[in-house]
Image: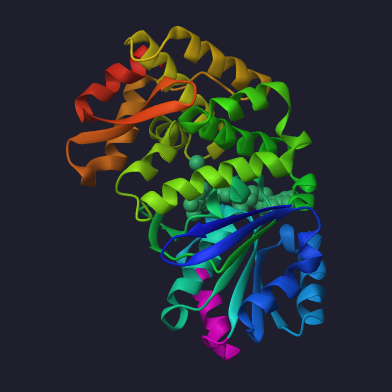
Amino acid sequence: MNTIRIDASRSYDVVISSGLLAEAGRRIAALTGKVRAMVVSDDRVFPLYGETLTESLRDAGLEPAQFVFPQGESEKNLATYGLLLEELCRLRFTRSDLIVALGGGVVGDLAGFAAATYQRGIPFVQLPTTLLAAVDASVGGKTAVDLAGGKNQAGAFYQPALVLCDTDCLRTLTEEEYRCGCAEIIKYAMIGSPELFEELVQTPVRDRYEDVIAACVAMKRDFVQADEYDTGARMLLNFGHSFGHAAEKCSGYTLPHGLAVAMGMAAMTRSAAKAGLCPPETAEALEGLLRAYRLPTALPYSAEALAEAARADKKAAGDRLRIVVPEAVGRCRIQSIPAGELLLWLKRGGAA
Ligand SMILES: NC(=O)c1ccc[n+]([C@@H]2O[C@H](COP(=O)([O-])OP(=O)(O)OC[C@H]3O[C@@H](n4cnc5c(N)ncnc54)[C@H](O)[C@@H]3O)[C@@H](O)[C@H]2O)c1
Ligand SMILES: [Zn+2]
């Protein structure tokens, strides 16, 4: 069992272990003394884990209610968010009660935003059930829903009261969801841990979930504690994401996020190597590791289309973009470039 304390605007523990779902009620009751718990989940996760969680809440003297919505990013919207708020209101939830998010990043982001805004904020607990949510989305307090105009465009910084990551839940992930989570883990290794990189080379993530998740959460803790509101160092977590987001956009959002990040990291690192900003071995090592996890390394769109997508994304930030550039395995830095240079970076990275 690993417990990592996060000291942000609110302090909370992230507990990582097998068997946590059945203990969730006791841990939540001990923490909050709250009376009622609204379990928010999607229709793929709830049938798998809802009953264990609900029973555990009931056994601990908490009164569970549930809000289950159809799985998928397209449900992370204002309509679902509104339905959840109305349900909380209908059941007369108050700030003496709490929300429990059981699911991946979609559930966590939506439930978290509802918690941040319902009655100006009620406590919430994250129970991440995807690898991506375990290492990234459930920690750090970014909550949001998507608008027609863009992903995560309505949201709040709102820290959970507790994060319980039961690694047993990860067994039912599809192969693709597993690989997508691994892409984000490789990102952590690239931005801050040559040791983690080497461990990922030696042992597959699924053979040592607990330690790998704990290593990533500890790194995220450091970023969040240094820069909770994402105006500086936390941006390093965007490594691979500027090209990755552009690729997602070019695919009409059919390309899974983790695969896009893998491509984005590989292209950025090739580009940096060609520009002499990192040794060629860095790009070779990264591509080798991505391939070992059966992750893509080539950007399947033209440099022009990708540059256009990235620029449209960043319009509000003016004519400069901040990108994350690798210097070595385990070390990256933030660099501001004129938007016009993006095409060059993409072409150097091998985009068609
Ligand atoms: N808040 C943050 O800091 C942050 C960080 C990264 C990503 N995100 C957000 O997270 C979302 C992506 O997260 P995600 O990949 O977890 O997506 P997701 O929540 O949609 O989960 C992916 C799929 O896996 C299913 N699933 C979840 N747990 C499962 C399990 N244990 N077994 C079987 N199936 C399971 C879900 O039903 C869904 O179909 C995006 O909306 C993204 O914007 C947020
Ligand atoms: Zn990501």
Magenta stretch containing residue 95, yes or no? yes
Secondary structure mainly formed by the magenta segment:
helix
- Judged left or right of residue 77, residue 166 is right
**In the image, 144: left or right of 213?**
left
Tell which residue pokes out farthest to the bottom in this image. 92
The vertical placement of 131 against 8, above or below, is: above
- From the image, which quarter does the C terminus lie in? top left
On the image, which quarter does residue 177 sit in?
A: top right
Q: Work out whether residue 151 or residue 124 is closer to the camera in this orientation and state it.
A: 124
Residue 130 horizontal/vertical position (percent): 66, 49
**275 in relation to 332, above or below:** above
Chosen colour scheme: rainbow
Residue 306 in the magenta stretch? The answer is no
Depth check: 29 or 5 in front?
Answer: 5
Front residue (pair 66, 325): 325
Residue at (52, 82) in percent of width and height: 86
Q: Position of residue 243 (x, y in %)?
A: 40, 29
- Residue 247 in the image: x percent, y percent? 44, 31
Q: Is residue 45 above or below residue 261?
A: below
Which residue is pictured at 53% across the width and 66% down the height? 160
Residue 303, image x, y percentages: 35, 20
Q: Is residue 173 above or below residue 87?
A: above
Residue at position x 76%, y 52% in the image: 169
Which residue does the image show at 56% across and 58% down from the upper left?
A: 5
- Which portion, as a residue range, is magenta? 81-96
